[in-house]
Amino acid sequence: MNQMGMRAPYPPAWRAWSLVAVLVAAYAVSFVDRQILGLLVQDLRRDLVISDSQIGLLQGPAFGLFYAVMGLPFGWLADRVHRPRLIAAGLILWTLMTLLGGMSSSFAMLFLTRIGVGVGEAALVPAAVTLLADSFAPTRRALPLAVFTAGISVGAGLALILGGGLIAFARDGVAGLPLIGGWLAHRAAWQVVLILAGLAGVPIAAVIAAIPDRTRGSQPVFGAAPEPLIAHLRHHRALFVPLLAGTSLLYLFANAFSSWMPALFIRGFGWAQATVGLRLGVLILIGALAGNLLSGGIAARLTRHGRANGALLVMIGGATLLAPLAVIGPLARDPLTAQIAVLLIYFAIALCFGVATAAVVAVTPAPLRGRMVALYLMLGNLIGLGFGPLGVGLILQHVLRDESAVGLALALIAAPSVLIGTGLLYRARAAYAARAG
């Protein structure tokens, strides 16, 4: 409703889906900037003289803790300010921090820039999800939100595909770039990759800043009084405790796997970075995009046929598929089996998380959506990014004492996190169905 309480029409389908496309591009860029370090692990260890635990800190807490903590303030802002401009400001910040990361000459400098990337990216999802929720009717919302979430898959795949190509380009052809080629030619390959990745987000920020904002449902335009989020959570704790805890534990494995999966092939099978980037990037794009689109399509169909808890049922299906794959897949003994495991694991992760934001939105009043999505992201990232990548690094360095045992470390992380997380989602079913219905 608008400030007079009148319901404005939803935008035309072409405009709403154009918004989806632009936000997918922004989400893809965010995941390129976030995940590209996974392909640079060996170079970072050599040039900065750092350990696996420090690599885990860069890929996990340095980014994740600040991404998580800043989510709630940005969620609060997403319920009150011009959301496209909020997204554009965050995009400029995280791309600048990625670029500055390419100028780092020490662990401490790179750590600080990863914090900046986390702060900037925290602005994206709460604002984007509420924009999309305001642009599609509830019965049609699951698919566009799943397509938006597919930006994760696109970004993760491109981080490897482009990263591998950029590494080769940085070593052989960067000097030929106009204006900046000579400056880049004197830098390490991993620094060139981060600088070029950072520059990619600038034009997208300009496009998003020009998008008009709109509101929907019962959410007032701007300047609304704060809503009782804590009271809402307490009243529906039988729903939100298992839902948020379960997704957070599943997110722990997802982040650990995406951060260390390139090292699994580089260390375990002796693959070159370019080979890892191309082959695994393509597998991620295929598996994860299929999972995202299938999750959105199934959830939308279930919702249209009267299953108000359709999004949660799809999440449970994805988590159930992921549980055995996450434990067994990283232990594959040959490259072919390991590649099949990567394809299936990313499919299952995408099937589960493709509709996670739609599941949260479906049981949240419009004035609370920005903050609720931010809370979901905050908890997921505090646990997922705070413990996932770092946990693998600590296990490798202090428990297994074998840097080639990445698969075993991932399996040890997966066993408790995925199995318990899946069980918690099952536990949320009854309360979710009552609330969504």
Image (cartoon, rainbow, N blue to C red):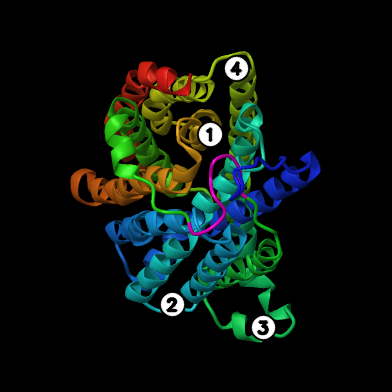
Kindly indicate whether the residue at mark 3 contacts the one at mark 4 (C-beta within 8 angstroms).
Answer: no
Which image quarter holds the N terminus? top right
- The reply, left or right, for residue 21 in relation to residue 227 is right
| Residue at x-position 39% and y-position 59% | 73
Q: Secondary structure at mark 2?
A: loop
Check disc 4: other Cα within 10 Å, few if <14, some if 14-19, many if 20+: some
C-alpha gap between disc 1 and disc 3:
43 Å
| Camera-nearest label, 4 or 2 | 4
Q: Which residues are magenta?
A: 215-223
First-in-chain label (4 vs 1): 4
First-in-chain label (3 vs 2): 2
| Residue at x-position 47% and y-position 48% | 370
Residue 118 falls within the magenta-colored stretch: no
First-in-chain label (4 vs 3): 3
| Camera-nearest label, 1 or 3 | 1
Q: Where is mark 1, residue-wise?
A: 358
First-in-chain label (4 vs 2): 2
Q: Amino acid at mark 3?
A: Ile
Q: Amino acid at mark 4?
A: Leu
Q: Where is mark 4, residue-wise?
A: 302
